[in-house]
Amino acid sequence: MTILRQPRTQEQSKTHKIRGLPPLMLSNPSMVTEHTPCTLHLSVLPPDLACRLFYVMIGASKKWQRNKWWLFDRVVESPHKTSFFARPMKASGRNVDEWQEAARFWYNGRMTDPPEEFLPEMEQACEIVEKVVNEELKKRNRYPLEYAGTQEKDLRYTKPVWEANVAAANCYEGAKESVGFHSDQLTYLGPYPTIASLSLGTTRVFRLREVIPINQAESRQARTFNIPLTHNSLTIMHASCQERFKHSIPPQSTIDLFRPTVNPDIATSSKASPGSCVTYPPSNCRINITFRFYRPDFRPQSIPKCDCGVPTILRPDMKSRTDGETEKYWWTCYAGAQNDGKGCKFWRVMDMEREGRGLCVGDLNSPKTDEE
Ligand SMILES: O=C(O)CCC(=O)C(=O)O
Ligand SMILES: [Fe+2]
């Protein structure tokens, strides 16, 4: 066969050089910014809060579950534990029950109780995380399909505020627990979401890899990026990360134990008995909390149902994405994950306008909005 092959053109030779790029370790925030749609923020929480939150979550994780779903004809179980939390926001008229269906989805339909509420330490952390995210958002260009914020009735004013209303937590015990390559389902997040991911405990590698659109497959190849996520670091997966990249926490051969540096103030504070640092033993676990903003225009009641009568999931068309404006998203059947692996063929293109969703950043300057 080699004999029949045409000699390479100059263009193909260039491509050939791009192929086979070795994985790149992104060991500091500026490298992460340069190569990925993420930003990395080190030491985001006060050290004592980070430490308390870690051990509170380790305690809570004893009750968390391993997600199970049907893959073809067998049940697979996630190689780590997970939990879903809703943030009580009574002041803004929202309560945790609204996210019951979303929470069920997190567990592939196995959860029937209302989701757990944020623990007090999660709330404290979330308020700090929100400030970091909003500062970062001010510096960035926004994509047209990003949520435009809450619009006041009289003015064309929108609050460009990212506000977490749910969180998903993961616990990886030891070096072997992991999560495979995926991009997060957009069902309740909508297109171009911002997801803030807090890491606590042992350092693990966060792996990112771009999905190359079909029409670029001949000209470039994806590169694997490895980002070591240290205790108390925040990774913001910015808009376009879920559309363009897949991410994973790969199993490792070894990990360093997490040894908390306990602030002596905690050990002697009224909340902790003197010498309570002994209750902070070294740990081989990593806790991850992804703070998420579930969009009001993608609320559970608005999600189309498939022919099985089950709410569908929203996925981006990663293979033929184009320009940040005209991407396609599909509603597809999810029943197969829960229902003995038997789903239906339901498949529908998501249509923001017809489905009455928005406002999006791109709508703000469009003539249609001006007339309203
Ligand atoms: O643990 C992490 O950093 C990633 C978790 C994740 O990808 C997810 O929960 O969707
Ligand atoms: Fe994820």
Image (tube, rainbow, N blue to C red):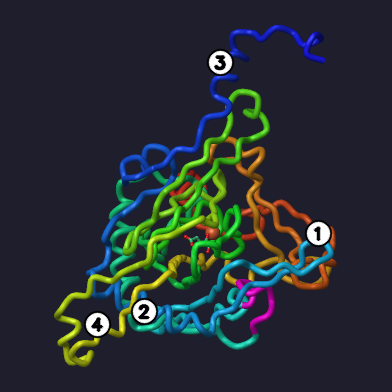
User: Looking at numbered disc 3 in the image, what kind of residue is underneath it?
Assistant: Lys
User: Looking at numbered disc 4 in the image, what kind of residue is underneath it?
Assistant: Cys
- Residue on which the image places disc 2: 55
The mark that comes first in sequence, 4 or 2, is 2
- Residue on which the image places disc 3: 14
The answer to whether 295 appears left or right of 277 in the picture is right
User: What SS does tag 2 mark?
Assistant: helix
User: Looking at numbered disc 1 in the image, what kind of residue is underneath it?
Assistant: Phe
The answer to whether 43 appears left or right of 225 in the picture is left
Q: Nearer the viewer, residue 282 or 98?
A: 282
User: What SS does tag 1 mark?
Assistant: loop
The mark that comes first in sequence, 1 or 3, is 3
Q: Is residue 312 magenta?
A: no
Q: Nearer the viewer, residue 332 or 36?
A: 36
Mark 4 to mark 3: distance in Å? 57 Å
User: What SS does tag 3 mark?
Assistant: helix
- Residue on which the image places disc 4: 277
Quadrant containing the N terminus is top right
The verdict on label 2 being within 8 Å of ligand 1 is: no
User: For the residues carrying marks 4 and 1, which lies nearer the camera in this image?
Assistant: 4
Question: Counting other residues with Cα less than 10 Å from the Cα at mark 2, is it few (<14), some (14-19), or many (20 or more)?
Answer: some
Mark 1 to mark 3: distance in Å? 42 Å
Mark 1 to mark 2: distance in Å? 43 Å
Question: Counting other residues with Cα less than 10 Å from the Cα at mark 4, is it few (<14), some (14-19), or many (20 or more)?
Answer: some
Mark 4 to mark 1: distance in Å? 54 Å
Q: Nearer the viewer, residue 276 or 326?
A: 276
Q: Residue at x 56, y 15 (%)?
A: 14
